[in-house]
Image (tube, rainbow, N blue to C red):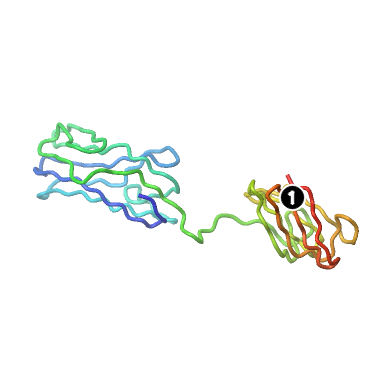
Amino acid sequence: MSGPMGTTFNAWVSAQDPLEVVQITFVYLKPGGSVFYPFRCTGGSSPLECGPAITSSTNPPPDPLGVMDELGTYEFLYVYAIDREGNESKYMASGEIQNVAGFTSHSLNIPDLVVESPPGTFLLKWGTNGTGPGQFIEHEDLVADNAGNIYVVDPQNYRVQKFDSNGNFITTWGTYGSGDGQFDNPRGVAVDSSGDVYVADVGNSRVQKFIGD
């Protein structure tokens, strides 16, 4: 199942003789590589049904049994059950689990779980007020190229700045003036399919084209 953070995933197993079942545990591999136990249940009722409601959260509480706390794919590994004599059985996809008295699978065709970030989730930010690399005064327009690099028009600094997709400063060009490569109140920027960069140089009533990557 895939979906935004907050998606609930349901699957369950049942025991015809629940007094024989001590514990049932679902086991996943987390995106970061560690093991994830989203749900456990214990015996004692008849019939025993274990129905995990795995609720993901961008700000999860310290609950390793109930919360998917990483973005990415949670790979289903297996379910295991333990009976009251300590016998353990693993169950991979569908069918019966053996060696636990009275224990059968029920609607347990379990997919991997994908936790995605919902629209509007904050990712990163960069920039402060100033004239140095990565700083801005009244930045006006920006555009991304095919490689994910970001070009930002910085009118009051009379320049264009280039960053990678993580906001790391790469380069800048432009000074005040009317010569080639100079700007007076640049206000717009665009990138074509070849990666060349176009800047609307409003104060000089022109558009300038620059070689991109």
Q: Nearer the viewer, residue 17 or 117?
A: 117
Answer above or below: position of 87 versus 172: above
Q: Is residue 107 left or right of residue 157?
A: left
Q: Position of residue 18 (x, y in %)?
A: 11, 44
Image quarter of residue 200:
bottom right
The outermost residue toward the front is 193
Q: Nearer the viewer, residue 82 or 167?
A: 167
Q: Position of residue 123 (x, y in %)?
A: 55, 55
Q: Position of residue 146 (x, y in %)?
A: 64, 48
Q: Which residue shows up at 9% across the image and 43% down it?
A: 17
Q: How many marks?
A: 1
Label 1's element?
loop
Q: Is residue 212 left or right of residue 28?
A: right
Image quarter of residue 182:
bottom right
Image quarter of residue 25:
top left
Q: Nearer the viewer, residue 60 or 158?
A: 158
Answer above or below: position of 111 versus 98: below
For badge 1, the amino acid type reads: Asp
Q: Is residue 102 left or right of residue 171?
A: left
Q: Is residue 170 left or right of residue 116?
A: right
Q: Position of residue 71 (x, y in %)?
A: 45, 48
Q: Which residue shows up at 22% across the image and 38% down it?
A: 94
Q: Quadrant of the C terminus?
A: top right
Mark 1: give few (<14), some (14-19) or many (20+) Cα within 10 Å: some
Q: Which residue is mark 1?
A: 196
